[in-house]
Image: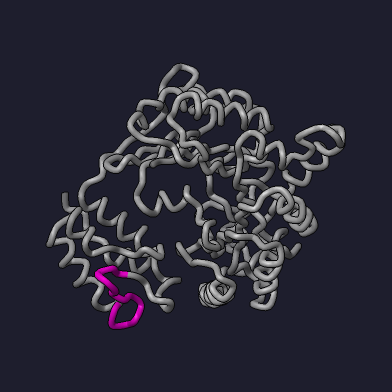
């Protein structure tokens, strides 16, 4: 099985912390949708022997697209690829878009007509999972991050979305300057009050060349405190695990039956195609990525060309990627797989490098599987980097 990721590179405004590829101008939206469809067509042979199990609209802000535009792209996936009967189709959405679209839709469509809400319209075209960028239920946090929605829109959005969808994920951010532990716990409790079955949660990160970095350097915003972020991460883990969530990946928690098939495929090393500017793809042996420029992307696809760069992964690259993804997940790193895929020298190297982390109780070895401990979870990326092998090929 494999998945298709479609990057929608538009946002109404730029969040201060974001370094993803997007444009705040929607002028080229029509051309972009046609270019995305063209890339889907041109790359259809890449998945000839595989079924598509997931379709994921990410961004950017995919909820800026209309129902007709989303339908058009989904139909193009079905047209060119072998899709399973009931694929997981996820739409990333911002609360303000959903609230605005819901109000507009309700005003325009007669009460007796079907679908009679934007959420039913999404379901009608095949979208069966929503990933909503709440980030925080506090106005001060939303303003600091320059989110497009406000506190009330976050609440209104979830009240309506949960009436129509059961498979909903929300994003929450911790480690925000000024966010107290008490307010962080209130954020988690608010999410739980809507019976949300999947929560993705990330530490606020200061990325280069973002507005957040500039404001911190100028002293306008306090710097991120890693100790506070780690403390709030642990509060999150404890709270959600007590409520029956599976902490299946460093930043992801789900009730049984609601693990993201799309995200799980990434971490388990399955193939996927990334459609759109800046989107990445992986086929098991090669990684490729599209140009990070909307105009160049549209121009290339208009000429029937793929604006893509490709690299072939070495054995060491594959080992390092497996270590990174494996340690972030509940499945861990299998020594049997290391031995089978990479050989004795890689297994010996891994165990040698892991020894110090096992002694510090940051890693533990159980049933020939290496996993991070509860104490080591927040540090898993750093631990993984120390287990990497230098690429000497």
Number of numbered tags placed on the structure image: 0
Task: Pick whichever, 288 or 248, lies toward us.
Answer: 248
Task: Pick whichever, 283 or 303, lies toward us.
Answer: 283
* Residue 148 seen in this snapshot: no
Task: Pick whichever, 246 or 391, lies toward us.
Answer: 246
Q: Is residue 126 above or below residue 238?
A: above
Which region is colored magenta? 358-370
Quadrant where the image shows the N terminus:
top left
Q: Going by the picture, which residue comes out furthest to the left?
A: 344
Q: Is residue 270 above or below residue 342?
A: above
Q: Is residue 362 above or below residue 33?
A: below
Q: Is residue 165 left or right of residue 77?
A: right
Q: Position of residue 238 (x, y in %)?
A: 54, 77
Q: Is residue 364 magenta?
A: yes
Q: Position of residue 186 (x, y in %)?
A: 70, 72
Q: Residue at x 27, y 63 (%)?
A: 334
Q: Going by the picture, which residue comes out furthest to the top?
A: 303
């Amino acid at each position: 099985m494999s998945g298709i990721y479609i990057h929608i590179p538009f946002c109404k405004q730029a969040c201060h912390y974001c370094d993803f590829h997007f444009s705040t101008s929607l002028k080229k939206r029509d051309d972009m949708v046609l270019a995305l469809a063209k890339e889907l067509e041109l790359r259809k042979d890449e998945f000839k022997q595989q079924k598509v199990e997931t379709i994921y609209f990410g961004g950017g802000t995919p909820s800026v697209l209309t129902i007709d535009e989303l339908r058009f792209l989904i139909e193009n996936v079905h047209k060119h690829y072998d899709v399973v009967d009931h694929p997981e189709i996820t739409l990333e959405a911002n609360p303000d878009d959903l609230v605005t679209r819901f109000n507009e839709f309700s005003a325009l469509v007669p009460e007796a007509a079907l679908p009679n809400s934007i959420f039913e319209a999404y379901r009608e075209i095949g979208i069966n999972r929503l990933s909503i960028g709440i980030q925080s239920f506090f106005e001060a946090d939303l303003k600091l991050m320059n989110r497009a929605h406000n506190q009330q829109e976050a609440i209104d959005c979830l009240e309506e979305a949960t009436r129509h969808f059961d498979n909903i994920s929300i994003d929450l951010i911790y480690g925000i300057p000024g966010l107290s532990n008490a307010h962080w716990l209130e954020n988690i409790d608010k999410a739980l009050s809507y019976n949300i079955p999947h929560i993705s949660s990330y530490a606020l990160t200061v990325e280069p060349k973002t507005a957040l970095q500039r404001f911190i350097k100028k002293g306008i915003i306090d710097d991120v405190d890693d100790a506070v972020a780690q403390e709030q991460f642990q509060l999150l883990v404890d709270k959600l695990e007590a409520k029956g969530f599976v902490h299946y990946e460093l930043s992801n928690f789900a009730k049984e039956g609601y693990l993201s098939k799309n995200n799980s495929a990434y971490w388990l090393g399955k193939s996927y195609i990334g459609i759109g500017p800046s989107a990445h793809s992986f086929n098991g042996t090669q990684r490729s990525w599209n140009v990070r420029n909307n105009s160049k992307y549209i121009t290339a696809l208009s000429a029937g060309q793929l604006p893509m760069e490709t690299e072939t992964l070495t054995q060491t690259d594959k080992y390092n990627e497996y270590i990174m993804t494996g340690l972030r997940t509940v499945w861990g790193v299998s020594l049997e797989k290391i031995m089978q895929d990479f050989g004795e020298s890689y297994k010996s190297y891994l165990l040698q490098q892991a020894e110090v982390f096992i002694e510090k109780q940051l890693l533990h070895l159980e049933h020939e599987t290496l996993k991070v401990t509860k104490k080591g979870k927040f540090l898993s990326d750093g631990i993984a980097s120390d287990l990497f092998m230098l690429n000497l090929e």
